[in-house]
Amino acid sequence: MTTPRNQQLIKAINKMQSDRRFFPLICPDDHTHRLLCAEERNGEMVLACPDCLYITSEIPEAIIALCESEFKTTDDVADVILQDNPFK
């Protein structure tokens, strides 16, 4: 059964994957595959490639931290990232 925390993280990660302001999480086996999708399998949150059998439970801590933060939308997250960007 999916926990409320995992449901929120999965939704937030998948939303970030479709937001062009963020570099997407891609399949390490083949970069031409579709973007990785966050989902829950056997009670564990994972990133899975929809085009092959690649699955990892290693979700970058920075992604989880952003999604668990006080921010409600990817716009809010993008604003903070852009403010802290030393390359702007």
Image (cartoon, helix red, strand yellow):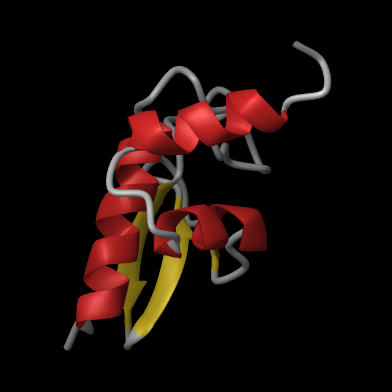
Q: Nearer the viewer, residue 48 or 62?
A: 62
State whether residue 11 is above or below residue 76: below
Q: Which part of the image, by quadrant, shows the N terminus?
A: bottom left
Please indicate whether residue 81 sits to the left or right of residue 34 in the image.
right
How many circles with numbers are drawn on the protein? 0
Q: Is residue 59 visible?
A: yes
In the image, 58 versus 80, the foreground residue is: 80
Residue 61 locus on image (x, y percent): 64, 63
Q: Residue at x 37, y 50 (%)?
A: 71
Is residue 79 depicted above or below 46 in this figure? above
Residue at point 42%, 30% (across, down): 34
Q: At x 45% / y 47%, what residue is drawn? A: 49
Q: Residue furthest right?
A: 86
Q: Position of residue 58 (x, y in %)?
A: 62, 67
| The C terminus: image quadrant | top right
* Residue 31 visible somewhere in the drawing: no
Rendering coords of residue 32 (x, y %): 55, 22
Which residue is at the front of the view, 49 or 11?
11
Q: Is residue 65 left or right of residue 38?
A: right
* Left or right, residue 5 beside residue 27: left
User: Is 31 drawn above or below residue 9 in the view shown?
Assistant: above
Residue occupying the point 45% across, 60% down: 69
